Image: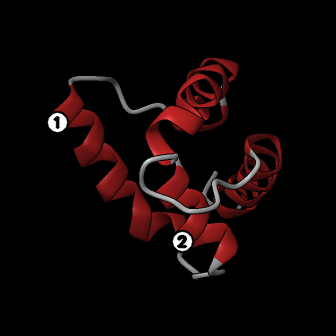
Amino acid sequence: MYDLWYILCKSEERFLWKELKPLFDEKCRVRGVQPDIESLTSDTLREWNENVWLNRLGPMLKDVPDFDRVWKVWVKTFHDLIKDAK
């Protein structure tokens, strides 16, 4: 999730959902899960990421961004990204 937030939110890279969807589908296939774009902003994913945020990112980053702020920006950005794809 950090990578998605960093690329799409912090660095403000611009992509269309049609460009990202094949990558999302392939990642789901490799992980053996059904592609479900709604899961990318689900409460389950939020909780999982919040629980591992500091442990996973702490060893790699000098300053770990605040999870609640990151999640809020990520959800808004993602919904903006897919709104035209539906």
Tell me: residue 76, above or below residue 16.
above
Which residue is the site of mark 2? 7
Q: Is residue 83 left or right of residue 31?
A: right
Q: Residue at image x 23%, y 47%?
A: 26
- Disc 2 residue crowd, few under 14, some 14–19, many 20+, Cα 10 Å: few
34 is higher (above) or lower (below) than 62 = above
* Residue at 71% over, 53% down: 74
Q: Residue furthest left?
A: 30
Quadrant location of residue 42?
top right
Q: CA distance from mark 1 to mark 2?
A: 22 Å
**Residue type marked 1:** Val
* Helix, strand or loop under label 1: helix
Residue type of the residue flagged with mark 2: Ile
What residue is shown with label 1?
30
Instruction: Compare residues 66 and 81 and report the one nearer the observer.
Output: 66
Could you say which is closer to the camera, residue 83 or residue 61? Answer: 61
Q: Secondary structure at mark 2?
A: helix
Whether residue 35 sits left or right of residue 1 in the image: it is left
In the visual, does 73 lie left or right of 10?
right
Residue 82, horizontal then vertical, whole percent: 64, 56
N-term mark: 1 or 2: 2
